[in-house]
Structures are given as C-alpha cells and as structure tokens.
Image (tube, rainbow, N blue to C red):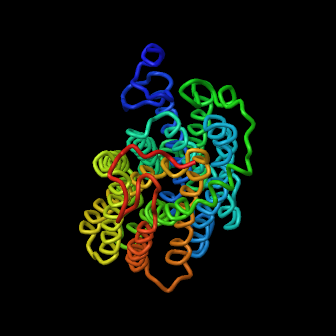
Amino acid sequence: MESTIKFSIAVDSDHRATEFRPFSISSPHMRAFHLAWLSLFSCFFSTFAIPPLLPIIREDLHLSPSDVGTAGIAAFAGSIISRLAMGPACDLFGPRLASATLSLVTAPILLSAAFISSPLSFILLRFFVGFSLANFVANQFWMSSMFSGCTVGLANGVAAGWANVGSGLTQLLMPIIFSILNTNFNLTQSASWRFAFVVPAVFQAAMALLVLAYGQDLPDGKFKTIKKEEKDSFGLFLNGITNYRGWVLGLTYGFCFGVELTMDNIIAEYFYDRFGVNMETAGVIAASFGFANWVSRPTGGVVSDELGRRFGMKGRLWGLWVVQTVAGLLCLWLGRVNSLWGSIVVMCGFSFFVQAASGLTFGVVPFVSKRSMGVISGMTGSGGTVGAVVTQLLLFSGDTKFSTQTGISLMGVMMIVSTLSLTTIYFRDGGGMFCGSSDYDYQPLA
C-alpha cells in the first residue's frame, strides 16, 4: 500500500516504475525521464550544431579536408574521455549532479566559437564541446535507476531516442539561424556563424539548471541522501571494468551508435558535395537522419523488452544481432547508390535500423551489473564514441584513399563483423544466444 500511496505510477519493491507513461510529468519517475531526455537533447543539439555550417566555416577558416576530418575525430575523442569518467561519477554522485555539472561546464565552450580564427582552434573547439555527449551515460543511468527491468528497455530507448533527435533538429535549424543573422540582421557570414552558436549554448545551460532545480536521482530521493553507505570507488570501477560483457557491448555499440555519430558528422557535407544540393537542402536531408530517432531507438527498446518477456536474455541478444546486421547491410548499400533520391530512401531505412540497434543494446546493459551500472553504462557509451573515432579516422579523415561513398560501404561491413561478438555473451541466469533459460526473471549481476 505504501508504494500505491506514495507514487502515481505502478512500481516494484524497489519503487522503480513498472509502467512507462511518456506524456506524464508525474514526479519522480516521469519528471526524471523528461529532464533526462531534454538535457541530453540540448547536448546533441550543441555538439552537432557545427557540421551543418561547415560549408561556410571551412571557407572562413581556410580548413583543409584533413582539418575537417581531424575536427570530427576530436569531437568524438573528447566524448570518449568524458563518458568513461561519467560512469563512475554517476555511481558516486548520482546522475542529476553529474549531468548538470558537465552541461554547465561545456556550454560556455561553445560560445568561444566567436573567437576562433585558425584550424587548430576549430579542432580544439570540437574536442571540448564533444565532452557534453557524456550526458548520455547519465541519461541511461538515470532511467535504469527509475524504471524496473520489465520496462527499462523502453525507458532507455525513448529517453536516448528523443534526445538524439537533437542531432537532427540542429542540422535543420542552424542553417536557418545563420541565414536569419546574415540576411535579416545584416551580419557578415563570418559573424553570422559565430553568433549562431549562442542559441545551442544558452539552451544547454538552461536545461542543466532545470535538472538541478527539479530533478531527483532515485525514486525515494536525491542520491546523497539515500546512498549513505561509503562508496568504494575503486571497487565499483574494478567490478565493472573486469566484466567482459561490458567490453562486448562497447564493441557492438561502437558500430551502431558510433556509426550513427559518424553519419551525423558527414551526412550534410556528403550530400552537399556529392549531389550538389545547397546548404539548406543538405541540412534538411541530414536532419531526417536524426529525426528518425524519435521512433527508431524507442522501437528498439520496445522490441528488446518484448523479446525479453517472451524468450529471456536470449531474445534480447538475438534481436540486437538481427537488427544491427540489417543496419550494416543497408549502410553497405547506401555507399553503392548513385542517385540522390535513391540515397535518401536507403539512408532513411539505414537510420531506422542503426538507431533501433542502439535501443536494443541498452535493453541489455542494465542486466550486466547492478553494483557497477554506471561503469558498464560508461564503458558501453564510450564504445560508441570509440567506434565513431575509428570509423572517422580510418574512412573519413580527409587523408584516406577512399571516397566518402566507399567509406560508407566499408563502415557497413565493419558493423556486420563486429556484431558477431554478441555470440560470446552469456548470463548465469539468462543464458546467451545459443543456450540458457527462457525465463524473464533474471536479475542484473553484482
């Protein structure tokens, strides 16, 4: 009776929600959900505000293809470091404080775009702004703390999927903001792209303040109030870092979400250069890739939960393998299509499956380790940005011998091969892809 009186949503014995109501703002579960996805949305909006303006920026700063490629790698490299640190930070301080602090620290960095004047300063800007993507780890940690196992895949999928739409919306809005400043306010092109970054920076800072003001780490209160026992930070880290399942999920996530990040970085410029569309049209096409997250990643979470109910962990793992393999095949095909409209159609199909694979991945993550959930989330999340760095460096750095379209096809091959590693995952209570229980009532490992 206590949980019925205390919460406006059905909960389990740990007061984690057993149902998901995305259009409710009831506290604490659904309020945390909305704060988490909007905060991460602002970080994606900020980080990917730069690529749609690259045709103007590269001319103004005299950037070479190598400079552009290095800057793209730098954005993801910064995220690797911060995501690894964010996992233990969530375990020790809670997702609310960890998330808001990072957003408030990185938002002013984006404003420094007004002062950059060289390729090196542009690369450093992208490196430090990329740190904000670590809020993804806090986002997933927060949802896993608020929602029970029967619905956590859906909660994680929607929270991250809706947030990732920010990477699409910024592709659409930043060229419009630039045009307004350039045309309506009579600013020069150089001044217009610099002042355009005020919008994402202010948005990100505002969301961080809302998280601090209205967020709650756990169903029963703030993290520092509930977690009274002394934390063994090294023990938490060691327990997580030695769990091989975290490494495997980090690898496969590197070639679904990592590939998605790489596409966010190159897709507008790809259509601009290959098919001769203008900057605004390229932005709209690139935006459609990110907008798919509104339904695709949540769909991955729903599928993971449903397969888990029917077939246990075996179902979750098989679902992830099938969806990510299909995404790899579509990515391979995308690089082989020579027409504008054909490329757009294949890109839309590819975006749905690659983003759904990310949702399916985080339908598995919460079951790897309850004690070191933040570390496992950080390892998996960092794997995403490592994959982005690897694909950007090997295939799209500006110094490679591959054309962009060939690089896209090779990226699809890498996706298909990496996903085979899922066959090595085995859970004591849930089994693996080829063996184990079909019962759903397996629990996260210690």
**Which quarter of the rendered picture does the N terminus lie within?**
top left
Question: Taking 75 as reference, is 93 above or below it?
Answer: above
Residue 103 sits above or below residue 377 on the image: above
Looking at this view, is 45 or 3 the one in front?
3
Position of 286 with respect to 249 (left or right) is left
Q: x and y percent of residue 325 in the render?
A: 34, 68
Point out residue 141 in the picture as x, y percentages from the top left corner.
Answer: 55, 42
Q: Residue at x 69, y 65 (%)?
A: 118
Residue for point 40% across, 61% down: 432
Picture quadrant where residue 216 is located: top right
Vertical arrangement, residue 23 with respect to residue 178, above or below: above
Q: Residue furthest bottom?
A: 401
Q: Is residue 358 left or right of residue 235?
A: left
The quadrant where residue 93 appears: top right
Q: Is residue 308 visible?
A: yes
Can see residue 173?
no
Q: Position of residue 234 (x, y in %)?
A: 74, 51
Say which quarter of the image contains residue 73.
bottom right
- Of residues 190 and 5, the one nearer the viewer is 5
Given residues 398 and 156, the one toward you in this image is: 156
Count the marks: 0
The x and y percentages for residue 174 are 48, 49
Residue depicted at x 65% and y 31%: 223
